[in-house]
Amino acid sequence: MTERLERAYFDLGRLDWRDAIDEPGGIEFNLPISSWIRLFHDIGFDVIDYIEVRAPESATGIHGTVAAEWAKRFPSEASLAGPKTAGVADRAVLSRRPRSDFH
């Protein structure tokens, strides 16, 4: 891990980690946070909280692949919370309106 982004945040999309030197993995798909919130809204969830997990000051060592010193400065995990509200069909009608990625 470094202290700078290795890829453009808005172009994450499909990330292939199968040939990664430090930790080979699989393929994952990422969206910017605003796109995740819109996606959850479109399928019937209201996001009421977004939590960025931060290591406590007393943390030491490595958890998984994340060093405690790094996780004290940057979120190592994130969580969206909220209830399912309207039906998917109801939200699908609302989501057909044109949108801009910039608000």
Image (spheres, rainbow, N blue to C red):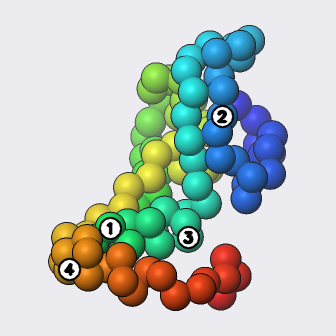
Q: Residue at x 43, y 40 (%)?
A: 58
The residue that disc 2 covers is 15
Secondary structure beneath label 4: loop
Counting residues from the start of the chain, the first of labels 3 and 4 encountered is: 3
Secondary structure beneath label 2: strand
Q: Cα distance, mark 1 to mark 3?
A: 15 Å
Contact, CB < 8 Å: mark 3 with mark 2?
A: no
Q: Is residue 2 visible?
A: yes
Contact, CB < 8 Å: mark 4 with mark 2?
A: no
Q: Mark 3 vs mark 4: give the one in front.
A: 4
Q: Cα distance, mark 3 to mark 2?
A: 19 Å
Rendered view: 1 above or below 10: above
The residue that disc 1 covers is 43
Q: Cα distance, mark 4 to mark 1?
A: 9 Å
> Callout 1, which amino acid?
Ile
Q: Quick one: label 3, few (<14), some, or many (20+) residues within 10 Å?
A: few
Q: Residue at x 46, y 46 (%)?
A: 77
